[in-house]
Image: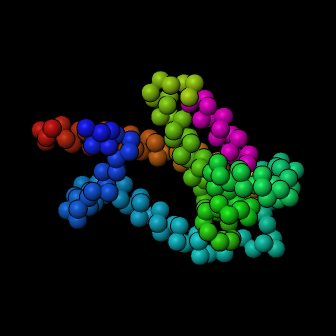
């Protein structure tokens, strides 16, 4: 058998094989995560279509003040900006930006910071402290870059960090309650 036949790294994710019954089962038995996903789609739609801050009156942000020189360098060097955009999306005009087009600003809170923080927390749970430290260092560098490209306000980064801790804790509680429900019903 090939690596793909055994469900290896080249195989399709399991959700790509779902039927309508599988979708109904997931929404019925895991409605809380489904509610979070629906809320995220709603948030993206609202924030993509709403003019948040007029360009004529940007707010005062200490992170923007601290990264003023980095912002000038990135604004004047589209190639460097695009290279950094390839590492993960950022906000000065680059072909690799997400969302496509010039929205008024990026989303509250920073999903980049939140995802990296969750990865770091997970590495700590797995006793992989050096890898967790690498994630933390990359997160700090990413935060500086996001401020320098004006991809997020400082508060977005701080709330992304806090949201990661909250959602990681919430996911742990959800997993524990799901495990207790399965054990309590006698299912395997």
Q: Is residue 2 left or right of residue 61?
A: left
- Place of residue 152 in the rendered image (x, y in percent of width and height, measured from the top left): 69, 56
Can you say which quadrant of the picture contains the C terminus? Answer: top left
31 up-or-down from 57: above or below: above
- Place of residue 78 in the rendered image (x, y in percent of width and height, measured from the top left): 79, 58
- Per the picture, the main secondary structure of the magenta-coloured stretch is helix
Query: Which residue is at 27% across, 57% downward?
Result: 17
User: Observer-nearest residue: 171 or 151?
Assistant: 151
Is residue 153 in view from this perspective?
A: no
Q: Is residue 158 left or right of residue 180?
A: right
3 up-or-down from 62: above or below: above
Can residue 138 be found in the magenta stretch? yes
Is residue 107 in view from this perspective?
A: yes
- Place of residue 181 in the rendered image (x, y in percent of width and height, measured from the top left): 21, 42
Can you say which quadrant of the picture contains the N terminus? Answer: top left
Query: Which residue is at 35% across, 59% downward?
Result: 34
The single residue placed furthest to the left in the displayed view is 186
47 up-or-down from 112: above or below: below
Range of magenta residues: 132-145
Count of numbered circles in the view: 0
Query: Which residue is at 53% across, 67% downward?
Result: 44
- Place of residue 119 in the rendered image (x, y in percent of width and height, measured from the top left): 51, 38
User: Observer-nearest residue: 155 or 102?
Assistant: 102
The single residue placed furthest to the front in the displayed view is 1
Can residue 21 be found in the magenta stretch? no
Q: How is the image coloured?
A: rainbow
Query: Which residue is at 74% across, 45% downward?
Result: 144
Locate residue 10: give its quadrant.
Answer: top left
Q: Is residue 91 left or right of residue 36?
A: right
């Amino acid at each position: 058998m090939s690596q793909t036949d055994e469900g290896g790294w080249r195989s399709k994710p399991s959700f790509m094989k779902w039927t309508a019954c599988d979708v109904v089962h997931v929404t019925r038995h895991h409605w809380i995560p489904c509610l979070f996903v629906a809320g995220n789609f709603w948030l993206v739609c609202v924030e993509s279509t709403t003019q948040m801050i007029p360009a004529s009156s940007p707010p005062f942000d200490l992170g923007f003040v601290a990264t003023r020189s980095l912002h000038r360098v990135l604004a004047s060097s589209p190639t460097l900006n695009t290279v950094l955009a390839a590492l993960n999306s950022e906000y000065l005009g680059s072909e690799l930006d997400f969302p496509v087009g010039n929205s008024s600003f990026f989303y509250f809170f920073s999903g980049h910071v939140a995802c990296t923080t969750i990865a770091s927390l997970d590495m700590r749970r797995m006793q992989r402290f050096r890898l967790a430290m690498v994630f933390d260092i990359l997160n700090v560098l990413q935060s500086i870059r996001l401020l320098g490209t004006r991809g997020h306000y400082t508060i977005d980064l701080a709330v992304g960090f806090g949201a990661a801790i909250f959602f990681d804790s919430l996911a742990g509680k959800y997993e524990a309650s799901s495990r207790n429900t399965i054990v309590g019903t006698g299912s395997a």
